[in-house]
């Protein structure tokens, strides 16, 4: 007897909730049910209502701006349609037609992929196409001592220092090996 009473009490509670539910909440609930959603948290309906109200307020605000721009005193159906259309144009983009995509794919596929060199480990693209390639160059010190040359401001702009010319030539060949002599430390 107690089990039957609990089931009846739950059914009566659901009917009371449904009667107390606002019309918009009932509509959201029926939409969820029509889409096959039977089990959901109660706050899902509130979130959908919040989204629905926010969307409507945005549309009506945009329609009011369009109406004021047109010099009308009231919002009409055309203003709402324009607001909805502008929101759709900025929110959603249509994919290009299938023919355009096929043409782009054919043009792209005409270029063959580069040949891969099979080797041990993970295959990586060439060094110039990766972020692991060296992105620096060393300046090679001169073997001969450089004597200071006194220059005037006019000469600095027109006659470059010979050591600067050598540095420019060295920078043009980035694959040149560089070695530096290490100072020898005496052990005490």
Image (spheres, helix red, strand yellow):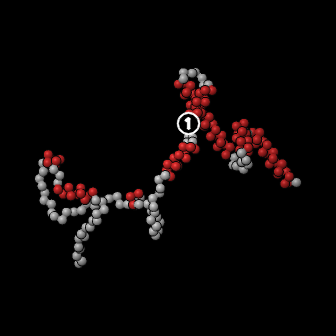
Measuring from the top left, give residue 19's x and y in whole percent. Answer: 77, 39
Residue drawn 28% across and 61% down?
A: 138
Residue drawn 88% across and 54% down?
A: 1
Measuring from the top left, give residue 167's x and y in whole percent. Answer: 23, 57
Quadrant housing the C terminus: bottom left
Residue at which label 1 appears: 89
Helix, strand or loop at mark 1 = helix
143 or 99: nearer the eye? 99
Residue drawn 62% across and 25% down?
A: 76
Q: In which quarter of the image is residue 55?
A: top right
Q: Is residue 178 left or right of residue 18?
A: left
Measuring from the top left, give residue 10's x and y in whole percent. Answer: 80, 48
Above or below residue 25? Residue 135 is below
Q: In which quarter of the image is residue 175?
A: bottom left
84 or 55: nearer the eye? 84
65 or 150: nearer the eye? 150
Farthest residue, direction front? 110
Q: Is residue 115 left or right of residue 77?
A: left
Residue drawn 60% across and 25% down?
A: 75
């Amino acid at each position: 007897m107690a089990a039957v009473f609990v089931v009846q009490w739950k059914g009566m509670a659901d009917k009371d909730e449904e009667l107390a539910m606002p019309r918009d909440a009932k509509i959201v609930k029926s939409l969820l049910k029509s889409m096959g959603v039977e089990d959901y948290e109660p706050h899902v309906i509130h979130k959908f209502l919040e989204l629905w109200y926010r969307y409507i307020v945005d549309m009506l605000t945009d329609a009011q701006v369009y109406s004021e721009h047109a010099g009308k005193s009231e919002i009409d159906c055309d203003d709402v349609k324009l607001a909805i259309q502008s929101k759709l144009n900025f929110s959603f983009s249509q994919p290009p037609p299938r023919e355009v995509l096929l043409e782009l794919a054919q043009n792209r596929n005409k270029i063959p992929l580069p040949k891969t060199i099979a080797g041990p480990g993970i295959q990586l693209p060439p060094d110039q196409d990766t972020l692991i390639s060296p992105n620096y160059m060393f300046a090679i010190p001169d073997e001969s001592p450089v004597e200071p040359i006194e220059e005037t401001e006019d000469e600095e702009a027109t006659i470059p220092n010979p050591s600067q010319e050598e540095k420019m030539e060295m920078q043009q060949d980035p694959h040149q090996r560089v070695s530096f002599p290490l100072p020898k430390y005496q052990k005490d």
